[in-house]
Image: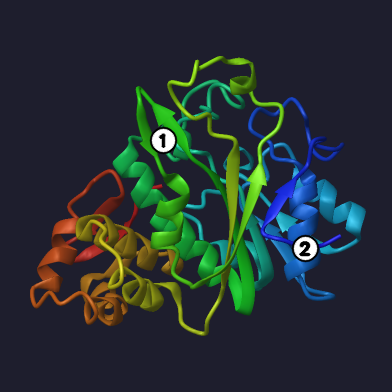
Amino acid sequence: MSFDSSVCNYPSRGNHGNSRYHGNCTGHIIRDFAETYLPSGGLLADPSIGGGTSQDVAQELGINFKGTDLHQGFNLLTDDFTSFLGQQAEAIFWHPPYWNMVNYSSKVWGNEPNQWDLSQMSLSDFNEAMVLALMNIHDATASNGYYGVLMGNLRRNGQYYNLSSMVERVAPAPLVDEIIKIQNNCRSDKSNYNGKIVRIAHEKLMIFKKKAQAALYFLSKTLNRHDISAQLTWKASVRRVLQQANKSLKLADIYAAIAPYAAQRDNEHWQAKVRQVLQDERYFNRLSLGVYELNK
């Protein structure tokens, strides 16, 4: 079936994927996403398949599918998703970590924390990584195609983190639908808060429609409408340029690729900002004078 309203509820998660993979979403919402937004014969893609839920759904529906994950060796923050797919996808489903609600590397998979694992990052690094990942996903989506991001919010030490709102602000495409998913069988269901706080009992599947522009251009238009850290988006944009090139670039080539984005940022010293960003050794390697590559 497809979505028939902006609210969905699946009391049973179904038999898709590995039910023991902590944080897996129900395959029913992926099925409804595909049946609503994927055209006949189109490709459904997933850059974070986790326990294999989307793969099982695609097999059940008999649709074209390609997916991967950090634990399989694909890094959404350093590898170009379009290159992995070999084409653009008509629909992409993404269910990222809800920041550090669940730690994945070292806990769900692997023996040690992975530096590229969104669930192991500080909040500021998580926000920047989300900008970069969404640019990558946007560029891997076919023109007039859709990408959906399932995100939940969380509360830490009495502070509410509206992660779904952050996704909406930084995605480089217009939001066309928002599906409220009721959460079932959560650990918090057993907790009694005595009316002191309101239990979070929903997630949001935000649907974005890809326009013709590349993410780097459209992101600048989006950010002009929202208040977000300029430093964060400059860094994510330079990372995206090197990620998409998949090779080292001269500074002049980086300037040329960044120029359309810079034109929207109202910063006459933007080349100095690019050089400043490139000094962050966590993400960039300087191979020689004026030549840089992504740190992988």
Q: Identify which residue is drawn at 55% across, 20% down.
A: 111
- Look at the image and tell me whether residue 246 can be seen: no
**Left or right: 63, with 3 as reference point:** right
Q: Nearer the viewer, residue 43 or 201?
A: 201
Q: Nearer the viewer, residue 192 or 274?
A: 192
Q: Mark 1: few, some, or many residues within 10 Å (few <14, many ≥20)?
A: few
Q: Identify which residue is drawn at 42% across, 30% down.
A: 155
Report the mark closest to the observer, 1 or 2.
Answer: 2
Q: Could you say whether the residue bearing mark 2 is in a helix, strand or loop?
A: loop
- Marks 1 and 2, how far apart at CA: 40 Å
Q: Residue furthest front?
A: 195
Q: Position of residue 79 (x, y in %)?
A: 50, 56
Q: Identify which residue is drawn at 58% across, 25% down.
A: 110
Q: Mark 2: few, some, or many residues within 10 Å (few <14, many ≥20)?
A: few
**Left or right: 250, with 40 as reference point:** left
Q: Position of residue 278 (x, y in %)?
A: 21, 57
Q: Is residue 151 above or below residue 88?
A: above
Q: Write down the residue under mark 2.
A: 4
Residue 269 lies in quadrant: bottom left
Q: Is residue 95 above or below residue 219?
A: above
Name the amino acid, label 1. Answer: Gln
Q: Is residue 190 above or below residue 68?
A: above
Q: Nearer the viewer, residue 268 or 250?
A: 268
Q: Write down the residue under mark 1.
A: 115
In which quadrant of the rendered image does the N terminus lie? bottom right
